[in-house]
Image: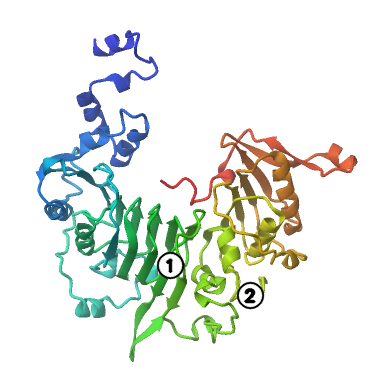
Amino acid sequence: MLFFSLWNSNKINPNDYISHLPDNILHHIISFLPFESAVRTSFLSTHWKHLWKEALLELVHDVITMEAATKVIQSFVDDFDTHYRPRNKWGFRFEFSHGRGKFVASISSKGALQLDFSAGKQELPRPFDLFLKPNLASANHLSPPYMWFDWGWHEENHPLQTQQPSLNTMKIKSLYLISVSQLSNMAVSSLVPNLPFLQSLTIAKCNGLQSLQIKEAKGLHKLVVLDCPRLQSLSFEGCCLECFRFRGHLVSFRFQLYCKCNSSGGFYIRDYGLHQEDAMLDLRQGPLTEWTWDFKPSFSPYYYGLLNLERNDCECANKYKCFDSILRTINGFRSLTICRWFFETSMCKKLPFSSRDPLFCLRKLKELWWIDCSMERESINALLCFLKLCPNLERLYITIDPKCYDMPSTAKFSTLVIVPGKLNDLKTVKLEGFADEEKEIFMARRLLPLFGDNNPIIISKSKGKYLKHLVKVAKLEKKGKYPYKFKAVENVDENFSDHVHMNLY
């Protein structure tokens, strides 16, 4: 009778009668979904936004202090049984006494802990610094690149202060910190060392965060920092990062990367740098303050067979704003996002733009997302110069965002693109944000000389609705015109997928 009455109501959309069921019934339905699917129901409509929290998270009233809430979370993590657990208990909704605020703590089935403080009162954020010092339990949870670390030496010199979880206990591998404030940052800092299996850390929308410092992060291999508008400095000290993603203003970066390996004579140092997966430097908001890029690897000077990775012959006025240093930080990544203005403002005077020089090229780079604010000729020249550093590139994504920060053109690239490099492995070029097809065609004409005998697919995304594919038109060729135009794509397959850094939350 309930479904029948809902269906016949004139006020209800017959295509969505489920949304009009009583909340307690919706809570019951959601409780049977896998956790990740339950969370995704929040995107259905405004009404569904908080239903999963009400269904799966326990409400805790009248919390006195943030420290008290942290102890509840820590106890929950330590006792979280992955085999025998009520299906409607995946975390907590904390409400502080006297209406002082609220926040959500939840654990996913994949070992991800999220602390979301965005539900509290959004007052004028007070500035604060966040200091995180992760702890480690053992090397058993790490992938092969980290197995050579001498964990016995580490535990002897840095004794753990946490108990080892049982076999049935959830091992938190990912931590998401959303909208941390000046009131909650100390509690967060005290919680992180008690997550001994942490491999991935995401910090997002912390409006008052001014400085982020992460030390002794020897097990952390993924760091994501998004949309922290007041952030001025980011410092990371630890072993190699497989993934580094940053979106926001350009700030002062400092990377101290190292690893310790056991040898017969004690310990020696190797450097693996930032490598293997991806780096996102989405800096389209421009610089907030004076910035620097300080990359200090600790390694054997003969690693990779190179005698001098420091290259002190650079003539740039400030070596901490030189692309040479930035290039050495990211030269092992397979996927990269970068803005044209950042590349241009930091370009090293000694950069030879030759794929033959192993010190100056991104040989492992397979996917590049290039972001710019305009289609000026000199801007395209900057892209062509950068592509000379990417001899093995397979996919190229170009986004024109008029809101992206701009800087006056230095006209330093014109003479460097006379002889374009060849991208023989390039399979796909995707254009997005261009004002009209004429500008898309102009970009395609500039890129075609790079392809050589290769014939990559060039597609464009118009107004976020549909894709167009660049095709050759024989009639235009006979008329002496540029023989290409864009045609709508009917079947979009995996070759046209977005870059891994696009559409992040």
Q: Residue at x 65, y 62 (%)?
A: 387
Instruction: Say whether residue 230 is left or right of residue 293.
Output: left
- Rounded to the nearest whole Å, what is the CA distance between mark 2 and mark 1? 21 Å
Q: Tell me which corner region of the image, top left, top right, bottom left or bottom right, holds residue 307.
A: bottom right
Instruction: Say whether residue 473 is left or right of residue 90.
Output: right
Q: Is residue 433 above or below residue 228?
A: above
Instruction: Say whether residue 64 is left or right of residue 117.
Output: left
Instruction: Say whether residue 79 is left or right of residue 108.
Output: left
Per the image, the residue denoted by label 1 is 252
List x then y, in percent, for residue 139.
Answer: 29, 69
Any part of residue 149 in sight: yes
- The three-letter code of the residue at mark 2 reads Lys
List x then y, in percent, for residue 32.
Answer: 25, 33
Q: Residue at x 51, y 64 (%)?
A: 333
Per the image, the residue denoted by label 2 is 349
Q: Residues within 10 Å of mark 2 (few under 14, many from 20)?
A: some
Considering only order in the chain, which callout, 1 or 2, is on the residue closer to the N terminus? 1
Q: Residue at x 19, y 38 (%)?
A: 87
Using the image as rendered, state which of residue 100 and residue 68 is in the foreground. 100
List x then y, in percent, for residue 239.
Answer: 37, 72
Q: Residue at x 34, y 52 (%)?
A: 207
List x then y, in percent, for residue 330.
Answer: 51, 67
- The three-letter code of the residue at mark 1 reads Ser
- The reply to whether discs 2 and 1 touch (Cβ–Cβ < 8 Å) is no
